[in-house]
Amino acid sequence: MKLMAQLAMVMNLDKCIGCHTCSVTCKQAWTNRTGVEYAWFNNVETRPGQGYPRQYQDQQRWKGGWTLTKRGRLTLRSGSRFKRLLNIFANPDLPTVADYYEPWTYDYDNLLSAPAMDTTPVARPKSLITGEDTAVTWGANWDDDLGGGPQQVSRDPVLAKLSAQVKLEFEQTFMFYLPRICEHCLNPSCSASCPSGAVYKRSEDGIVLVDQDRCRGWRQCVTGCPYKKIYFNHKTGKAEKCTFCYPRVEVGIPTVCAETCVGRLRYIGVVFYDADAVLAAASVPDERDLYPAQLGVFLNPHDPRVVAEAERAGISQEWIEAAQVSPVYQLIVDYQVALPLHPEYRTMPMVWYVPPLSPVVDALAGTGHDGENADNLFGAIDALRIPVEYLAELFTAGDVGPVRAALRRLAAMRAHMRRVNLGEPVAPEIAESVRLTPTEIEAMYRLLAIAKYEHRYVIPSAAGADAHRLDALATGCSLDSDGSPGMTAFDVMDGKFHLTAHPSDTNGAAAPADKARRINLLNWDGKSTNGLFPAVPISNGPVSNGQISHGSATNGAEPVAERTR
Amino acid sequence: MTGLLWVTVPYVAFTSFLLGHIWRYRHDQFGWTTRSSQLYESHLLRWGSPLFHFGLLAVLGGHVLGIAIPASWTAAAGVSEQAYHLLSVSFGTLAGLATVAGLGILLYRRSTVPAVRKATTTIDKGMYLLLSAAIGTGMLNTVGSNLIGGGYDYRATVSPWFRSLFTIHPQPELMAGTPVSFQIHNLVVLALLGLWPYTRLVHVFSAPLGYLTRPYVVYRSRDANHPGARRYARAWEVSAPPSARR
Ligand code: SF4
Ligand code: SF4
């Protein structure tokens, strides 16, 4: 057994209102640069819908993720390593800008500089790639809220997998939102397809990152990732991806998308797993066994043997305790209401989803039934083929069993809590019908509905993981070193930040010259407004954006000589 | 003049090639990339790029055979001059044609697809110019002198001269009487070598052959990135000691 720790996320889809706040704040923090205008490390797509990039789930076409060879061995769907190398000069499975969208801006200046005339001047759309006039024909969420109607929506690759009859019932339209980030997979096919070995999984927390210095621009990872969560920076010629906001989680605060989520529907926590069991679990022959197989890889942090193994692996007490109260582990393993997105890609994704019950409730309410009644809800979950079959295609490779079970638990919670709230006598059989006790169901309710910040985000600091290492440093005052208890989270953040302001992360040429005047959300912890607003009038000379006390490195103002030392 | 052209110029080019690569590898890992433009355009690239790259690899292989291996060795191995000539010209022409066709498609793509044209830098243009000239003159030599003309035995002059550069006794006089087209080809290639480390051609030295043998998933410890172990000096300052801040 090789015990490893993974930072994972769960999103409760019932609560997502599709506001895109997470996407926008993520973009402000990470991809408001030339070359990655089209990159949305976090995107929110309407389901049913085509997703972003268009139809990325059609793996016949994009060849992402893993598949089994005839002999049952795990191999990249896009072909053997040798085949990947032969295709290195022109990757046949690479989406182009047309599959994302051509990023654009508007010629706003024309509104001010146009001469006086009878008609109102217009701001024409300009391509951010060529600088020429462009026609805006697609975007990152073009089919938002089923926009474009059946013509667009019917191109959803997940819909195509459903039986014809279910598709016919499509008139009874349902929809929900699916926010997506990189899955920080246990078996990342992006890393496996990188010829340079630049895409790596961090052994301390499982975050998957691209080493900007080692990436050589072979763009095989874009194909390798079935979720299309690696983006090629067309300016710098390097791959970029969601970083799980590592500078933030290293100091114990949640990712920007989670921090700013309006619905408060994201949970972050530690999961222990057995790295030696991953390959076997990812290679089970039947796709529908992948979800249970992945559950089997996770280790119970309350088991004394697991704790002993974690200690032996050098994992600090802080991390072990965090794993024991991990909201993610509870939702995935204890309550089994969270499910993985597309386990059939065999990457063992680590961002899981609580499926939405609301389409079922809406369907019930629409027919005049009581959408809070347990029997009605159970009956509807069993009777309604959409959305259940659709959800099963998303979360369990088409197996409706686990989806029904998760929905039944949510339904039971709903019915139980209504009785509690209305002061009616509690009916224990509701909880028992989903194999929970009333106490458990109320604990689940608290976690899903009203959990506070510190219960939704249980993130041990990286400094904690380093404690044993720092202790070992016998020389010098421990208060002097980075990450020691004498420093505040922000002191450490400053250091991390330097990494993102460093040219190896945001190429000097690609980083906008006026970056300092831009809004900075990456280190926002919700406690102050520092960095949220540009503080200095544009015309002022020396740059200071109110960030000084938190480290000037964020200003990107480091002298060139410093970089190369 | 002979000394300048065939001793000084090559050594300057080699020095630039060598030191340039070392300098760039040490200081510009981030800039070390193919800077692929496939994201903009895929259809033309899928024809042009493999034709060009595989063709050029074959051409390079041919050059290694023709330059590095002395004629006496092939003769000793029992390959007659005619047989060698036939082989080198036929394979050289095939590989050259693929390269030229590929380059043609790539240049057409670069100049007509707006996004790709926009992404072309000045140094790219210089590089393309030299590369096209090198391939053009090379093709001229193979097809013009060797196939149509009577044939020119460069293995008696150009190859030994090139090898002599790597001994301490360069022999520029060997190049004195060579056909002008060969001389131009050599000079263009030397210029290209000199410019090489400053262009995206550096990606040649990142050919990822290790991929075939390494484990699929790469694990790395965060410690490598830890501030304490950072390769660069810390550019930020703690504004006040932690105690003074509370
Ligand atoms: S989701 Fe993330 S970790 Fe998984 S394959 Fe894609 S980029 Fe890699
Ligand atoms: S911020 Fe939260 S509620 Fe809004 S779209 Fe993102 S995940 Fe959904």
Image (tube, coloured by chain):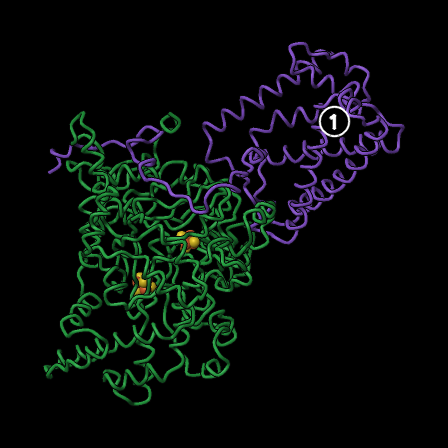
State which quarter of the image contains the C terminus of chain A: top left
Chain letter corresponding to the colour purple: B
Q: Within 10 angstroms of label 1, few (less than 14), some, or many (20 or more) residues? A: some
Q: Which residue is at the front of the view, B107 or B67?
A: B67
Locate residue B206, reporting x and y percent: 54, 35
| Badge 1 residue CB within 8 Å of ligand 1 | no
| Element class at badge 1 | helix
Badge 1 sits on which subunit? Answer: B
The picture quadrant where one finds residue A536 is top left
Relative to B130, B157 lies left or right: right
Locate residue B210, reporting x and y percent: 51, 38
Relative to A446, A355 lies left or right: right
Chain letter corresponding to the colour green: A
Q: Is residue A86 visible?
A: yes
The picture quadrant where one finds residue A297 is bottom left
Relative to A446, A8 lies left or right: right
Q: Is residue A184 above or below residue A431?
A: above
Q: Which residue is at the front of the view, A276 or A549?
A: A276
Q: Which residue is at the front of the view, A167 or A108?
A: A167
Q: Is residue B200 above or below residue A176?
A: above
Residue bearing the label numbered 1: B66
Residue at 30%, 80% (x, y): give it.
A361
Residue at 37%, 83% (x, y): give it.
A384
